Image (cartoon, rainbow, N blue to C red):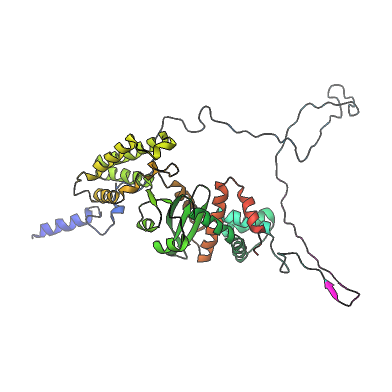
Amino acid sequence: MTRIEVLERELARYTTRKDSNNSSMPPSKDENRPPRTSSLREKSNRKAGGQPGHEGKTLEMAETPDKIIEHHSCFCPECGKDVSELPFEFSGKRQVIDIPPIKQVVTEHRVYRCKCTCGKVVESDFPPGVDSPIRYGNSIETLIGYLSVRQYLPFKRLQEMLNDIFAVQISEGGLHWLLNRLASKGVDAYEMIRQNVMHSRVIGTDETGVKINGVKHWLWTWQNNRATFIVPSTNRGTTTINESMSGISGEAVLVHDCWKAHFQTPVKKHQLCTAHLERETKYLEERYKVAWPVRFRNILREAHKLKKQFTPTDYYYPNHPRSLLEKELDNLLSEPLDPKHKELIAFQKRITKYRDHVFTFLYHPTVPPDNNGSERAIRNVKVKQKISGQFKILSAAENFAILRSIIDTAIKNNQNVLNALNVIADYKRI
């Protein structure tokens, strides 16, 4: 090799842009590589904001105001005569909504004793819950749980808010202790939620990574239309499923993505999340510029349309449009693909393996085609970590899981979240 060739090779090595083909850089870092996941929402011709005909909302007057201030004129602006003694008639009203000054209320409990004629000293008892010389009440406990778990406030900002608005000063250790106390009262409700989900006919499940003191853990959820059960775990495999869902209904349909551990759950049927599959095909379409992913996605969308047209009896009897879709899918899965399109081939093999779980929602009226409910259930921990940072200890993640399960379940049942936490705070385990 001549000196010129050596220099040209060295120059090419330093001027060529690095990618996954000429360096150790992972493929995900390649420029112009399509994102793995992207929104499935398509653009419409509608303008942003409220659409014509939508139900508007406006500030309405209260029928029974808490305070009424009457205003009467004293003098006539024309002649200056005193009119304060003249009869007045009502001519109009306006209302101002405001919040009164908020301050803490300290309640002191006193006990007394006396000496009976028999010589016995009789002393009264402190009420249940008043078990130390000074303590924070249940309302503060509820508010801290609400602000931390529902509104995702970090401890520093939570301390600031309690001090600035309520004149209540609580240390970080005190906040931890109160969250522990509230979560411990919610253990029974947490178990009731688990039982509700475990014995339902349709169950959605998902998991996501969560950092606890710098170490990766997993936050799992199992949920239905009425309840959400969330649990943190060190394990992303079947160990967590066996521990958390022991006794799950064998007649249930489990809705989830293609994570292999979910297929080990002892249920009757599975439904793959078609939203996940659509996002994958969108990536594969942009990656390889071929029609196969588009055709697969169109089959899924036609299945969604078909479900909306189904009557209750269509699910349980032979249906010609459904049979056509299944045949079209089988034909697509049997088509040979370009050997260079390795990710697309892997996707085809995976769908072929789980072929029986693609159209389960066309055989059961209550089974959804996607797992969006489970994704919403665990998305909140990502929001929590974005705002507040990682959990420092496992018990903090467990407290979050307990209280968030209760909060999400209350929301699904159209209950006031603060009231639901109040019920938990007032609960006394026997």
Residue 393 can be seen, yes or no: no
What secondary structure characterizes most of the magenta part?
A: loop
Task: Report the residue that reaches farthest toward the front.
Answer: 317
Residue 312 percent across, percent down from the top left: 44, 37
Tell me the quadrant of the picture where the C terminus can be found: bottom right
Residue 235 percent across, percent down from the top left: 41, 64
Residue 122 falls left or right of residue 257: right
Read off the magenta span.
99-122
Query: Residue 110 colored magenta?
Result: yes
Residue 127 falls left or right of residue 388: right
Q: Which of 54 and 405 is in front in this view?
A: 405
Q: Which of 7 and 374 is in front in this view?
A: 374
Residue drawn at (24%, 49%), measured in percent from left and top? 345
**Location of residue 240 by image quarter:** bottom left
Residue drawn at (24%, 58%), measured in percent from left and top? 23
Residue 218 can be seen, yes or no: yes
Numbered circles on residues, count: 0
Task: Report the residue that reaches farthest toward the bottom.
Answer: 119
Residue 5 percent across, percent down from the top left: 11, 57
Query: Residue 178 colored magenta?
Result: no
Residue drawn at (71%, 51%), measured in percent from left and top? 102
Image height of 49 relative to 217, above or below: above
Residue 350 percent across, percent down from the top left: 29, 51
Image height of 345 relative to 136, above or below: above
**Location of residue 178 by image quarter:** bottom right
Image height of 303 relative to 3, above or below: above
Residue 63 falls left or right of residue 88: left
Tell me the quadrant of the picture where the N terminus can be found: bottom left
Task: Report the residue that reaches farthest toward the top.
Answer: 78
Residue drawn at (64%, 51%), measured in percent from left and top? 419
